[in-house]
Image (cartoon, rainbow, N blue to C red):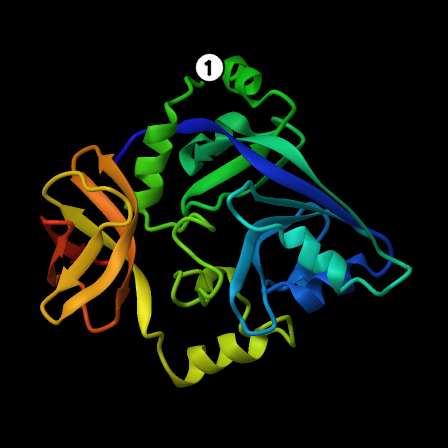
Amino acid sequence: MTGRVAVVRPRRIAWIEGPDAGALLHGLLTADVAALGVGGATRALVLTTHGHVVAQMAVARTGDDEYTLLLDAPPARDGVAVIAAHHVSEHAEVMGPEDALVLVATADLAPVLAGAGELTVPGAIPGTIEVLADDPAAIAAGRGIALARDDVLEALRVERCAPLIGVDTGDGTLVQEARLDDAVSFGKGCYLGQETVARLHYRGRPNRRLARIALEGPVATGAVITGDAGPAGEVTSIAEVPGHGWMALGMVRREVHDGAPVDAGGTPGRVLPPG
C-alpha cells in the first residue's frame, strides 16, 4: 500500500507533572523515559506485574517536569489507571485521562505538518505520526491534506502488522506475542512486568505471535485459523489492502511458520512475514 494517508482518530490524553513525574513514568513504563529531553517523545507500554500488555501510548516530555501521554481509546484498557495505582509520591500529579483527537498521518506528511497542532508524536502504526489538536480536520484542510476514510487507515494498520490493543490482544497477551518489542528499552532498569519481558527476550520465544495472513477473500473476525496440525488461532482484524487483496491479523501458534498455508473460516490463505 503506497500513498499519503491522513485520518482523524480518537485518543485518550493524560498529563503527569511534578518533580517526580519522570521517575514515576521511567519506573513503570517499558520505554527509557529518563532519556527523553524536553520536546522528545517515544512509544511505550504499560504492563501488568506479570508482563501482560495493558496499553500502549506515546510519551512526550513537554517540560522539565511535565509529560503528556496519548493512549488508545476503548476498547483498549485504561493505562492511566495503572500509573495512578502505583503513584505514591507527593511530588507527581496524575491528571486524566480525557478524550482527545489526533491526526494520524503517514510519515511522509511530517514536513507538511511541521509545527501543526499542540503536539506531534510517533504513531502506533509503524511509519506514522500523530498530531494532537482540538480540530485535526481543520489542520489537515489548512495544510492541503485530504482526509482518507477510516478503512484506509485500517488497511495500513493490518498491512504493517500493528496490533490494536483490546482487539488483536487480550488480557493475557505478552509483549513479544503482540510484536511490540520496539516499544521496550532492554537496556534500562526495572519497570512493571520487566522480569517476564526480559526472560522471554533473552531465553526463549513466545508460543504464539501476531501474524499477517494473505487471504483469497473476506472472512469474519473470530474465524478459526487452521494449519497443517489443526486449529492455530483466530482472525482478530481483517482489511482489503490496495494492491494486496484481503489480509487478516491473528494470533497463531509458533509452529505455523511464515509462508505456511492456512485456512481461515473456510477461506484459503498464507502466513506472511511481519512486514
- Compared with 97, 212 (above or below) is below
| Numbered disc 1: secondary structure | loop
Q: Amino acid at mark 1?
A: Gly
Left/right placement of residue 257 relative to residue 29 reads left
Q: Is residue 98 visible?
A: yes
- Point out the image quarter for the N terminus: top left
In the rendering, at what x and y percent does residue 156 appear?
33, 38
In the rendering, at what x and y percent does residue 84 appear?
75, 57
Q: Nearer the viewer, residue 129 or 197?
A: 197
- Examine the image and state in which quarter residue 245 appears: top left
Q: Residue at x 43, y 77 (%)?
A: 201
- Examine the image and state in which quarter residue 132 appears: top right
Q: Residue at x 58, y 53 (%)?
A: 42
* Count of numbered labels shown in the rendering: 1
Question: Which residue has dot 1 on it?
Answer: 144
In the rendering, at what x and y percent does residue 253 appear?
26, 69
